[in-house]
């Protein structure tokens, strides 16, 4: 019983909402709640937190009541760790390289790394794509739209 | 009333035909169509990515461009679903059912031609509705006090989250999460920073662009990476002259188009039932009244004409509550409303009288934009077909760059890029747990106004919660909310199995989408 429960998606979905709701409710008591007539900043989040906790419990309840689905996994069947990692790493590198080396380096790093997330991607294809996007991207954003973001810089 | 409507419309055409507005409308439609055609890019992703580009433009131009992007990407999505059997946008899931078999029979061009015509018919009717209904709604809405606004918003939020996709319970949960995200930042009345965790960049609240791009950009890319198989384009050779449907096809499509338009406009009137439900209902109706229902799914031209007409008529209808009441029906409308708010325009019933150029310009631009679309799509179909073959592995890295630079450019702040990454990661986790992120945006956009009106209503009523049922108009809205919840519970408890599978099939486009070619 408990074993099957642990494999259900709704178990985690409900649990997450309960945790979130309870957290918000607790946190909102650090602000002034006030009265219903003169509501303080804490009142609205307090109400919402309770509502969310309640919904979380309901979702949790559906997990208990419904049978386990045939194909129920939390993670999708094919685990794309490389893809997920590269997609998250791209924007992170954009921040780091963009902040310290400028737009060209940031753009290149972002596209190059995230392109590697595809299984069929090679270093060469990613390089070419990154070079192309950097060229046209800088053209569009620096020259046409004139975003205040230096193309090259060194340090902050 | 008709005379004033025409005067206003005339004025609107004046606004929309100003050269720079016309240019933004054209750019919006073109880019929207182009991006919408790309496999794996729905209207939500398209609008979110292009949203930052509109910040530098004058409000009227910006809103015309965004609306153009929206219906342009819908046209693009139709091309994608008919020629490739890939519905990028849920309403198109049913178009695939008959559109793709037609493509396999070599009539894909005709199906596209019919799509263009029926979208135009549907949209025209929706626009007409908008012209006449919006002013009426405004006169009613201007009499609303905070209690009425509050319960109306509650109805909008509930309808938007329970009638959309997937489990209604999870939809409501996502709306509450959206409302909570809207709270982050300084409190409007006291200025107390709430849920900012001491980070000064969060004092202004969560940036809508970061939220939209995280949920519909990064999270979507994480879902689709390596999942979209190489698209099969062996059927999708469509040329300019193929677009003309035969007389026989036109004769069969006409009544279907009109029925679809009617169903779409009816669906638009019920809050929360957006284009997706409209297209499913119209397809089902068409199948039911057809003399040969068994032929549906094998390439019936009616099965393309009807859902497309109803989608477009209901999409235009969705603009009515968005523009006249300031209450969006779905995430796309919430984004457009968010764009208006970024431009410093307060949504609500006063919008039409305070900014007639925006409202009437938008109405007129719908027609102009739809005509531009027809003109664009007919000769450029060859180019669109070429675009279909761009593999996803080149698409998403380039889109990620647009996400990063777009978020950065809203405030020239790298912190927001980080915010987007975190929202994207959390959004993907929520997707894995079967939560649909669209209602988050709905709650986020309405949240601050909801809280403000709630507080005001409670202040006026001296803390009496019963005020929401004592005012008659507000009581009607509350009653509708209760009705909505009760029907949802009833539907789920009554026939859990048969109906659930049917609902699931209707609700989840992926359930029927990947028909092997």
Image (cartoon, rainbow, N blue to C red):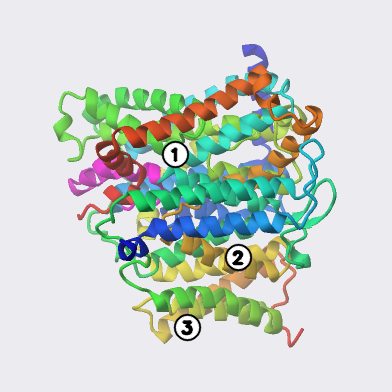
- Residue B348 falls within the magenta-colored stretch: no
* Front label number (1 vs 3): 3
Q: How far, Cα to Cα, is label 1 from label 3?
A: 38 Å
In this view, the residue in front, B349 or B408, is B349
Q: How far, Cα to Cα, is label 2 from label 1?
A: 36 Å
- Label 3 in the same subunit as label 2: no
Question: Magenta stretch: dominant SS?
Answer: helix
**Where residue B21 sits in the image (x, y, percent)?**
66, 42
Measured along the vertical axis of the image, is residue B268 above or below residue B163?
above
**Where residue B139 sits in the image (x, y, percent)?**
69, 19
Write down the residue under mark 3: A127
Write down the residue under mark 1: B374
Measured along the vertical axis of the image, is residue B84 above or below residue B341?
below
Measured along the vertical axis of the image, is residue A145 above or below residue B322?
below
**10 Å crowding of disc 1: few (<14), some (14-19), many (20+):** some
In this view, the residue in front, B122 or B159, is B159
**10 Å crowding of disc 2: few (<14), some (14-19), many (20+):** many
Q: Residue at x 36, y 48 (%)?
A: B79
Measured along the vertical axis of the image, is residue B392 above or below residue A66?
below
Callout 2 touching callout 1 (CB < 8 Å): no
Residue A99: quadrant of the picture:
bottom right
Magenta highlight range = B86-111
Q: Quadrant of the C terminus of chain B?
A: bottom left
């Amino acid at each position: 019983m408990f074993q099957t429960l642990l494999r259900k998606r709704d178990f985690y979905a409900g649990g997450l909402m309960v945790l979130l709701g309870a957290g918000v409710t607790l946190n909102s008591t650090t602000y002034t709640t006030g009265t219903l007539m003169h509501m303080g900043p804490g009142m609205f989040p307090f109400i919402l937190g309770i509502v969310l906790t309640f919904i979380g419990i309901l979702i949790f309840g559906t997990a208990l009541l419904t049978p386990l689905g045939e194909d129920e996994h939390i993670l999708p069947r094919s685990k794309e760790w490389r893809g997920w990692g590269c997609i998250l790493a791209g924007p992170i590198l954009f921040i780091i390289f963009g902040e310290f080396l400028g737009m060209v380096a940031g753009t290149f790093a972002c596209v190059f790394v995230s392109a590697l997330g595809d299984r069929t991607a090679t270093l060469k294809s990613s390089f070419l794509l990154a070079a192309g996007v950097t060229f046209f991207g800088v053209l569009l954003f620096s020259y046409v739209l004139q975003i205040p973001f230096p193309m090259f810089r060194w340090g902050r | 009333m008709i005379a004033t409507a025409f005067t206003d419309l005339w004025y609107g055409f004046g606004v929309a035909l100003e050269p720079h507005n016309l240019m933004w409308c054209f750019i919006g439609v073109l880019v929207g169509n182009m991006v919408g055609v790309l496999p794996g890019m729905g209207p939500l992703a398209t609008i979110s990515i292009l949203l930052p580009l509109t910040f530098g433009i004058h409000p009227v131009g910006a809103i015309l461009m965004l609306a153009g992007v929206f219906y342009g990407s819908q046209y693009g999505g139709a091309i994608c679903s008919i020629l490739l059997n890939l519905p990028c946008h849920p309403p198109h899931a049913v178009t695939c059912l008959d559109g793709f078999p037609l493509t396999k029979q070599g009539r894909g061009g005709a199906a596209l031609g019919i799509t263009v015509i029926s979208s135009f018919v549907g949209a025209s009717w929706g626009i007409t509705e908008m012209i006449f209904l919006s002013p009426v709604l405004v006169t009613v809405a201007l009499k609303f006090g905070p209690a009425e606004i509050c319960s109306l918003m509650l109805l909008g939020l509930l309808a938007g989250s329970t009638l959309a996709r997937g489990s209604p319970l999870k939809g409501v949960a996502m709306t509450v999460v959206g409302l909570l995200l809207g709270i982050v930042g300084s409190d409007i009345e006291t200025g107390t920073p709430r849920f900012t965790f001491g980070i000064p960049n969060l004092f202004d609240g969560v940036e809508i662009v970061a939220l939209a791009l995280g949920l519909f950009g990064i999270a979507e890319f994480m879902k689709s990476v390596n999942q979209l198989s190489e698209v099969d384009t062996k059927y999708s050779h469509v040329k300019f002259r193929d677009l003309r449907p035969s007389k026989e096809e036109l004769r069969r499509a006409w009544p279907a188009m009109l029925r679809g338009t009617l169903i779409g406009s009816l669906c638009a009137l019920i809050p929360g039932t957006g284009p997706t439900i409209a297209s499913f209902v119209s397809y089902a109706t068409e199948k039911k009244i057809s003399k040969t229902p068994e032929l549906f799914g094998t390439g019936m031209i009616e099965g393309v004409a009807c859902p497309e007409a109803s989608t477009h008529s209901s999409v235009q209808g969705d603009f009515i509550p968005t523009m006249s009441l300031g209450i969006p029906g779905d995430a796309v409308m919430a984004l457009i409303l968010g764009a208006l708010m970024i431009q410093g325009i307060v949504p609500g019933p006063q919008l039409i009288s305070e900014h007639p150029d925006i409202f009437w310009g938008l109405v007129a631009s719908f027609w102009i934009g739809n005509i531009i679309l027809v003109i664009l799509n007919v000769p450029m179909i060859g180019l669109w077909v070429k675009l279909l073959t761009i593999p996803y592995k080149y698409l998403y890295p380039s889109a990620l760059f647009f996400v990063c630079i777009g978020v950065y450019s809203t405030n020239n702040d790298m912190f927001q890029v980080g915010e987007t990454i975190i929202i994207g990661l959390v959004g993907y986790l929520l997707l894995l747990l079967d939560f649909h992120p669209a209602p988050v945006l709905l709650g986020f956009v309405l949240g601050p106004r909801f809280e403000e009106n709630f507080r005001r209503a409670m202040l006026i009523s001296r803390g009496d919660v019963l005020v929401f049922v004592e005012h008659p108009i507000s009581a009607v809205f509350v009653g509708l909310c209760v009705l909505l919840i009760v029907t949802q519970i009833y539907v789920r408890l009554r026939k859990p199995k048969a109906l659930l599978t049917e609902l699931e099939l209707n609700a989840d486009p992926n359930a029927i989408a990947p028909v092997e070619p």
